[in-house]
Image: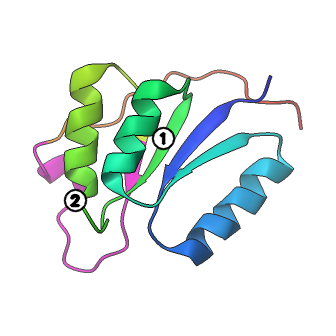
């Protein structure tokens, strides 16, 4: 069974690029273009890792992370390329906590 990775990203080009890279390595990618959709998918699907954009159209990535952290422990990797955005560590949202495990065979 493939590891499930949820990618919450509103840029279709970034979504396609990451999807190609992950699926070529045997991962199953779940996609959300909005923060609230990502929260719903994370709460209804078995997700092993969440890649999270910070700048989203409905709620920002900081709020997505707060909501996900309050509902269950998850492996969450937030990122953002927006200039002037504050670092995730300074956002008041707990940092990442991912345990290591073997991914799909290469």
Precedes in sequence: disc 2 or disc 1: 1
Which residue sits furthest right? Answer: 106
Determine whether, in the image, residue 78 is placed left or right of residue 105: left
Q: Depth check: give the residue in front, 37 or 19.
A: 37
Image quadrant containing the C terminus: top right
Q: Mark 2 points at which residue?
A: 87
Whether 38 is drawn above or below 8: the answer is: above
Name the secondary structure under disc 2: loop
Residue at the image position 23 percent from the left and 59 percent from the top? 60
Write down the region rendered in magenta: 77-92
Distance (Cα) linking label 2 and label 1: 18 Å
Residue at the image position 26 percent from the left and 80 percent from the top? 83
Q: Depth check: give the residue in front, 73 or 95.
A: 73
Q: Depth check: give the residue in front, 26 or 92.
A: 26
Q: Mark 1 points at which residue?
A: 50
> Disc 2 vs disc 1: which is toward the camera?
1
Q: What secondary structure is the stretch in magenta mostly built from? A: loop
Q: Position of residue 96 (x, y in %)?
A: 35, 35
């Amino acid at each position: 069974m493939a590891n499930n990775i949820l990618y919450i990203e509103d840029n279709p080009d970034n979504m396609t690029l990451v999807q190609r890279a992950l699926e070529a390595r045997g991962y199953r990618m779940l996609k959300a273009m909005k923060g609230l959709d990502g929260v719903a998918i994370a709460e209804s699907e078995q997700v092993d890792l969440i890649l999270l954009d910070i700048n989203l159209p409905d709620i920002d990535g900081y709020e997505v992370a707060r909501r996900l952290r309050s509902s269950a422990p998850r492996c969450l990797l937030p990122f953002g390329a927006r200039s002037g955005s504050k670092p995730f560590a300074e956002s008041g949202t707990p940092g990442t906590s991912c345990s290591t495990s073997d991914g799909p065979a290469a």
